[in-house]
Every structure is written in C-alpha cells, then in structure tokens.
Amino acid sequence: MSSEKRLLEIIQSNPANQHCAECGVLDPEWASVNLGIFLCIECAGAHRSLGRDKSKVKSIQLDKWTDDEIASMKNIGNGMAEVLYDRRVPFTHKRVSFHTPMGVRAYIMQQKYGSGPVVQDPTHPAAAAAALAALGENKSVIPEHPAYKEGHLFKKGKDNNSWQLRWFKLTEEHLIYFVDDEDVPSNPKSTLNLKNIMVTLRSHESFKTQFGLQITYRQKETKGGSDEFRNFFLAAQNGNDLVEWLNGIRLNRARLLGLTTDTPKDEAQRILAELSQEVVREGFLQKTGPKGPPGWKRRWFALHDDRLLYYKSLFDATAKGNVIISKYCRCGMVPDVIPVGHCFELKTPLRVYLLQADSAESAEMWVKTVQDVIMRARETGKEPSETVMSAAMGS
C-alpha cells in the first residue's frame, strides 16, 4: 500500500484528523511529522516558518514517507497533540482559527511549539501516552496576574488615511493612548475601558503593516436606543509585538469579566467566547433605508460573530448602523422580482433589511454565513444583548 493511502486511512479512521489541527479546515493535505498533526496548506506554511527543529512539514501526496514517519502520525494525531500542546498556552491567549490572517499564524503557533516536540520517540505506540502522563493533570493555564504593556503602535487617523506612531499603555482595566511621547503619563488622548471593547486581528493592504488590530469600542450603553461604536485601527511593527498586545488585552478583559483560577469550566468557556470576535464575513453590499427601494446605498458590512455592523466605507472610525444576529432572526434569498437582482433579506424582531450583493454567489455566501450564526444562537439558546445592539440600523 502506498504511503498516501496509509496516511489517508489514518485521517479517515479518526475524526480529529479530518480537520486541520490549527484552523479546523476540512481535508488537510499536509502534516507535521515530528508533531504528529495534519494541516491545511496555509497552516503548513506557518509551521515551516517555525523551523524544522520545531515542525517538520511534509505533503501527504507529494512527498516520500518512511514507515517511522507514518507510525508517528498514527501514534499521535490531532486529538492527542491538542491535549499535549494546548496546555503550554495560557487559557485566554488567542488560538489560530480559519479567520486568522496568514501573516500572524506562525507567531500565535510559536506559543505552542516554541519549546519543541513533547513526544521524544513518536514511532513508539506508547510514547504519546507516556508524554501525557509525564505532564500530569491537564489544568487550563490561567495567569494569576494581569498583563501590563506599553510601547509604540501605528494608529490610523479618525478622519483620514494617515498612520502615526502613538504611545499605548495597557493597564489592568484600560487601554490608553497618547498623541505625543511627552504627554505620557499625565495627558492621555483617550482611555478605553477594556470591558467595552472587541479586539480583532486584521490584515489588509491598507494597513501600515501586515500586523494589524481592530479595536471596536462601545462608547455608550443604552437599553432603548442604538449604541455608539468607534473603531481604532492599529498596526504593530512585528508579529511578536502584535500577539503580545492582543493576548494582554484578552487576559485583562477576561479578568474584568470575572475569570479567575477557580472559575468553573463552563463559565470560563463563556468568558473566553466574549474576549474577541472574528470577522466571519465582510464586503460591500447595497442596502435600502427603512422604507425600502429605490433608495439604495453602498455600504461596507462586517459580521463579527453575532453582530453585524456597516460603514460608509472600509476602515471608517464609526459605524453607520448595527444589528445583532439572534435566534429570532431569519435570512434568505429574495426572488428576482426586484430589478437589481442578487438580493437577500435579513428579518429581525425590529425590522426587515433588504440587501443586495454584487453577484448571486456573493449573496448566497452572505445568506449561508448569517444562517450559520442564527443556527448557533438557536443551538446555544443565547439571548440577544439588551445593551449591545438593540436598535434598527439607520441609513
């Protein structure tokens, strides 16, 4: 039997191996031999940048495999590797996902694999189990103390596309920035309460560097009206610095939300889900006002997990409107009775939103993504926030 068929048998016999060990994409075609994990092509590239002493990458289809290498994949696999290596990473730290920008993945993976492989002889069937036993009880690593960090980051101007170096400071409860170095520490330009922010990794050619963060700050909490949001677009000068800022913000926000070393597992997972929200889909769509056509306006939409924000243009500081995607929503294609075509609608308890994509394929992808969010909300029974996003979107 060929090495490719033997490896495919290992993948097919274990559900954990049928997804990329890092980002979760289906049908991995690459692998890390010494770590014993299966990878997608993007994460395989990130693993290569770790160095062969940390991760020896091979193609399942294109490379030659020895019997020992195939044995390593069988003896470890994605499931065992997750148990072995995830304990190296603090509980609140960012993990790689499908939405993580490619240029940042290796810096996140460095947390898990920087110390090298745990299993010393992966060709031995009992080696992985022995390594697991030697590590002792699997306890989530929750740091006992908050993170403190300060230094320069590039910040995009609120009303222009210029990027300027600004001094930022992370404290136990706030993210603070100063316009000039001489303003530190007594004259901050802005102080953001960590409880009221979402932090998201970003990558776009418009960023000053490839190592970008989007801080979405909720400026007001209201029960009857729209909350106000402000985006801060930041860029670090290197990937390590970016990941340190990201993980520091996540840790301190988790502490403010009640996470301690004694927090029950279910509650800890709930807090973890709130730390940062991925941009699961974004792009330009046409939308109508509350009265419907013909008043179409082109807006940039960004779906952050269960909240949809839209802007006049990409990287605007403030959103034109927002809506929460809850279990009470519906989303589906609209028959081509409207002359413009490629339309779909999002029904919420407060309003029906008619949206138009540039193509039928794009519209269908938006519908599927929103339907997936609605389905998750129904499965979890999560109620929409009373204060985060409750009002209808404006124009």
Image (cartoon, rainbow, N blue to C red):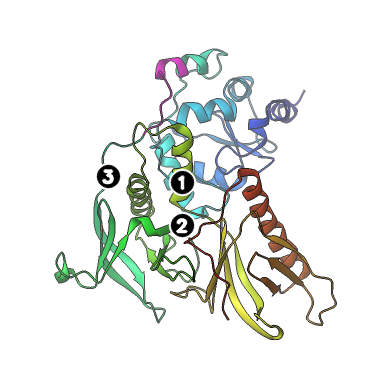
Residue 43 sits in quarter? top right
User: Farthest residue toward the front?
Assistant: 224
The residue nearer to you, when weighing 260 against 160, is 260
Q: Residue at x 57, y 23 (%)?
A: 76
Numbered circles on residues, count: 3
- Main SS type for the magenta part? loop
Mark 3 or 1: in front is 3
**Disc 2, SS:** strand
User: In this orientation, does residue 129 appear?
Assistant: yes
- Residue indicated by mark 2: 201
- Residue indicated by mark 1: 106
- Mark 1 neighbour class, 10 Å CA radius: few under 14, some 14 to 19, many 20 or more: many
**Disc 1, SS:** helix
User: What is the x, y in percent for residue 219?
Assistant: 38, 68
Residue 152 as seen in the image, left or right of residue 31: left
Residue 131 as seen in the image, left or right of residue 38: left
Kind of residue indicated by mark 1:
Ala
Mark 3 or 2: in front is 3
* N-term-proximal mark, 3 vs 2: 3
Residue 146 tag number: 3
Give the answer, above or below, for where 298 lies relative to 66: below
Give the answer, above or below, for where 320 lies relative to 251: below
User: What is the x, y in percent for residue 67?
Assistant: 64, 20
Range of the magenta residues?
A: 132-141
Give the answer, above or below, for where 247 lies relative to 61: below
